[in-house]
Image: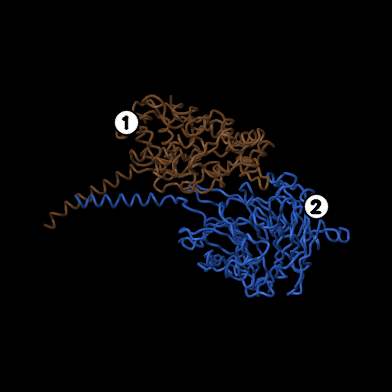
Chain colours: A blue, B brown
């Protein structure tokens, strides 16, 4: 009789175990990330958007939890952004889909999934780069930089979209070849940031990486949505190219009350970080100055600005490090600790916690994810190939210690173009 | 000796096989929820692994919710104090008590319970929805039902035998709680004008949009930012309290120190939680009057007046409320937002965008007995 009872217990326990395993409760998603994956031509893979687990403490570390292949486009999506009402957007490199809204949903266990990619009519604007939401005369719009604009050798535009309907409200264009001598122009815009009624966009490089390279930032008056000033940010030319300003950040008191307003600029080919002080009362910009020289400090290709509550992080594609600074001291760059040593191509990053509560930073290490000549990949460009580690490295945020590495090329035969935290976690200041 | 054991072993094996087979015949045959969807922006949610969302559990939970069989006198159902049309509140400051008088608290709205705080009731006395679901059933002032008697009554019903078998396998107190919890978990309100706005399908009016901005802002006179301070307690999308630990409980300045009720302290024993109550969802708030845990305010205008100039100071008053002031310079006798009438009207206009007619009239949540009577 005792054995019979024991057997019943075993059977019941097994039944309960089956029941418990039938539904995966969604206990936490702080460590899940959205990634844009690029199919690599020689490896026969397709571009996609995916949700991936990035907690080194999880048995699922590195697993793709949900993935949706891009519709048939030659070039992939490029950069993810959440809007203020929680809608997810991505810029895109393909002329057929330079801006898209991404559908997200949850199943009945609470697990998130990617459900769709809806390309948005950009009225001919191509090669979407960065997005930010800002007010013009009291109305909030979605501003998108298009590095190719509507085409041509000196193209480039800032698209102003209705934040509700995604319809184009205005295309801000000012070709250097068409404006008067000395008048402000917009060319190859990439980075974007704003403070009060002033917006700044950078002038980076023609999307073909050959036709032209910029060395200025353009100030846009958000009252009129017109460009009003160009500021040159070029000093050393370590590659003998124009400086190619890439990401910009309008440092402002809303990020930290001690911050004096100033534009910060990373120059991709000048290897420098610049600051341009701003007087909010007179609405004038001071003299641009170099606050960090990669040539003098052994780094190159500075790319992104990311901040949390008390630190500012800047990624440097070579040798692949993230430098960290005191947020309150901006626009001065006052170091708060040793570099976080990522991989070549150190680029975008996210901040989150592990299951045990450890503060983490994950760095996506790829510049453009082009292929490698060793694979006979036609998209290879020597300079850029050395900036493509195809990895996301995960580090302890406090110490910088590397805890894990996910190599997308080895595991999924794809490159990784962008990482963004799943909604509800991630960075505080980006633009 | 060995031969003598063989028949016994065979008999035991047959018994076991029979028991397993009978169990299989009676085992639940539950299926996933049909067409489940929830807005991504509501955030993550966790469903207990031993009570997954199934269609059969939902239908059983709905029937139980509307059935007065759950009460000792077979006269009171959950739905007696939770009307769908009122977002599952009852329109009263406090629901009547079986022993006469009133219950201590107002009936809470049952909306979007998979998100927000992981404790239930105004004072957080239930740690799971399954637990919450059975507490009113056995409470002597609410439904006054002896659980063993309820189980016997349910076992006497062919319909319930069939529904429990399909959803959970057996009729038990635990499974009554699980079914009710499943029904309540699926009371998802996500089709208000605000939801439509979040999806990009609708524009808010100028007044609603102004109210939305005030709702989402903590006032800061240093940068001339005016705000209603609602977001400090009511999250952006769900408009409920925050999920983390006890973050979703707060003292919102209803009573002074001398008359401050225990609130959450009754559960935690921590004096720092005195006067704390669960921050409710504001979904469908326009139809859930009267307001607060004791229903002391009849209208949203009265609620806004409370936050504007009627905050009672006590030791545990939320510092976010204490310091939220839109006027320059501290007033000696007023603690509150000090918004203009227009600003308060705008916030109320925004709150009306949280009314979800689809939710309030969804036949899937309605009384299943109506079709049977």
Taking the image as drawn, is residue A38 in sight?
no
The residue singled out by tag 2 in the image is A226
Relative placement, left or right, of A6 versus B217 is left
* Residue B84: percent from left, percent from top: 50, 31
Q: Position of residue A64 (x, y in %)?
A: 53, 59
Q: Could you tell whether A366 is left or right of B266 in the image?
A: right
Above or below for A366 versus B301: below
- Dot 1 crowding, Cα within 10 Å, few <14, some 14–19, many 20+: few
Secondary element at image label 2:
strand
Quadrant in which the C terminus of chain A is drawn: bottom right
For mark 2, does the 10 Å Cα neighbourhood hold few (<14), some (14 to 19), or many (20 or more) residues? some
> Which residue position holds label 1?
B153
Task: Name the subunit of mark 1.
Answer: B
- Which of A431/A129 is in front? A431
From this view, report whether residue B245 is shown above or below residue A429.
above
In which quarter of the view is residue B174 placed? Answer: top left
Q: Nearer the viewer, mark 1 or mark 2?
A: 2
Going by the image, does A155 lie left or right of A14?
Answer: right
Residue B63 occupies which quadrant of the picture? Answer: top left
Closer-to-camera residue (A299/B311): B311
Asked whether residue A399 appears in the rendered view, the answer is yes
């Amino acid at each position: 009789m005792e054995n019979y009872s024991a057997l019943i217990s075993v059977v019941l326990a097994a039944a309960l175990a089956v029941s418990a395993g039938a539904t995966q409760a969604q206990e936490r998603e702080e460590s899940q990330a959205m990634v844009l994956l690029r199919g690599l031509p020689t490896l026969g893979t397709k571009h996609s958007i995916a949700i991936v687990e990035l907690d080194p403490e999880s048995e699922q570390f590195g697993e793709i939890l949900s993935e949706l292949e891009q519709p048939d486009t030659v070039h992939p999506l490029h950069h993810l952004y959440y809007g203020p009402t929680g809608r997810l957007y991505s810029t895109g490199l393909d002329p057929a889909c330079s801006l898209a809204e991404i559908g997200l949903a949850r199943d009945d266990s609470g697990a998130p999934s990617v459900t769709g990619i809806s390309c948005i009519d950009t009225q001919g604007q191509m090669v979407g780069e960065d997005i930010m939401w800002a007010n013009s005369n009291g109305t909030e719009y979605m501003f998108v930089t298009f590095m190719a604009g509507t085409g041509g050798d000196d193209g480039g535009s800032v698209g102003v979209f209705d934040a509700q309907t995604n319809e184009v409200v205005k295309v801000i264009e000012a070709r250097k070849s068409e404006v008067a001598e000395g008048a402000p122009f917009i060319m190859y815009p990439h980075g974007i940031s704003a403070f009060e009624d002033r917006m700044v966009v950078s002038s980076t490089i023609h999307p073909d990486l050959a036709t032209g390279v910029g060395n200025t930032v353009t100030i846009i008056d958000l009252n009129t949505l017109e460009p009003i000033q160009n500021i040159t940010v070029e000093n050393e030319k370590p590659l003998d190219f124009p400086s190619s300003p890439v990401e910009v950040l309008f440092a402002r008191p809303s990020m930290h009350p001690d911050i004096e307003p100033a534009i910060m600029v990373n120059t991709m080919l000048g290897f420098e970080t610049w600051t341009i002080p701003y007087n909010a009362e007179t609405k004038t910009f001071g003299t641009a100055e170099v606050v960090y020289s990669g040539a003098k400090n052994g780094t190159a290709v500075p790319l992104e600005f990311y901040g949390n509550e008390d630190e500012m992080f800047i990624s440097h594609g070579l040798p692949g490090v993230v430098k960290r600074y005191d947020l309150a001291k901006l626009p001065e760059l006052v170091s708060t600790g040793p570099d976080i040593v990522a991989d070549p191509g150190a680029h975008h990053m996210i901040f989150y916690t592990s299951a045990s509560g450890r503060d983490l930073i994950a760095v996506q290490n790829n510049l453009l994810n082009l292929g490698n000549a060793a694979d006979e990949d036609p998209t290879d460009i020597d300079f850029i190939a050395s900036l493509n580690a195809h990895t996301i490295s995960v580090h302890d945020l406090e110490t910088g210690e590397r805890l894990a590495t996910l190599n997308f090329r080895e595991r999924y035969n794809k490159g990784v173009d962008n990482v963004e935290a799943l909604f509800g976690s991630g960075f505080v200041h980006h633009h | 000796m060995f031969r003598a054991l063989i028949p016994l072993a065979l008999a035991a094996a047959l018994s076991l096989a029979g028991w397993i087979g009978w169990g299989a015949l009676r085992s639940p045959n539950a299926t996933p929820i049909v067409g489940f969807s929830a807005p991504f922006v509501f955030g993550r949610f966790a469903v207990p692994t031993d009570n997954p969302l199934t269609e059969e559990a939902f239908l059983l939970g709905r029937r139980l919710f509307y059935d007065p069989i759950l009460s000792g006198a077979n006269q009171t159902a959950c739905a007696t104090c939770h009307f769908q049309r009122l977002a599952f509140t009852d329109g009263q400051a406090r629901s009547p008590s079986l022993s006469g008088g009133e219950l201590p608290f107002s009936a809470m709205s049952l909306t979007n319970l998979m998100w927000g705080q992981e404790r239930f009731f105004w004072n957080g006395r239930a740690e799971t929805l399954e637990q919450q679901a059975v507490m009113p059933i056995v409470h002597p002032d609410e439904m006054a039902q002896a659980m063993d008697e309820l189980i016997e009554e349910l076992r006497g019903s062919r319909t319930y035998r069939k529904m429990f078998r399909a959803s959970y396998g057996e009729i038990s107190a635990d499974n009554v709680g699980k079914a009710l919890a499943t029904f309540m978990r699926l009371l998802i309100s996500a089709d208000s004008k605000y939801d439509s706005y979040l999806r990009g399908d609708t524009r808010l009016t100028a007044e609603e949009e102004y109210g939305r901005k005030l709702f989402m802002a903590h006032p800061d006179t240093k940068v001339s930012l005016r705000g209603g301070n609602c977001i400090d307690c009511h999250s952006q999308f769900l408009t409920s309290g925050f999920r983390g630990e006890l973050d979703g409980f707060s003292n919102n300045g209803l009573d002074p120190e001398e008359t401050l009720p225990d609130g959450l302290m009754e559960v935690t024993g921590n004096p720092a939680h005195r006067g704390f109550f669960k921050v409710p969802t504001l979904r469908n708030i326009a139809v859930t009057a009267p307001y607060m845990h004791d229903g002391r305010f009849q209208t949203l205008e009265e609620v806004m007046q409370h936050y504007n100039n009627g905050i009672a100071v006590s030791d545990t008053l939320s510092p976010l409320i204490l310091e939220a002031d839109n006027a320059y310079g501290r007033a000696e006798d007023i603690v509150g937002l000090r918004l203009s009438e227009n600003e308060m009207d705008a916030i109320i206009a925004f709150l009306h965008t949280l009314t979800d007619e689809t939710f309030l009239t969804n036949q899937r949540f309605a009384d299943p007995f109506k079709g049977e009577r």
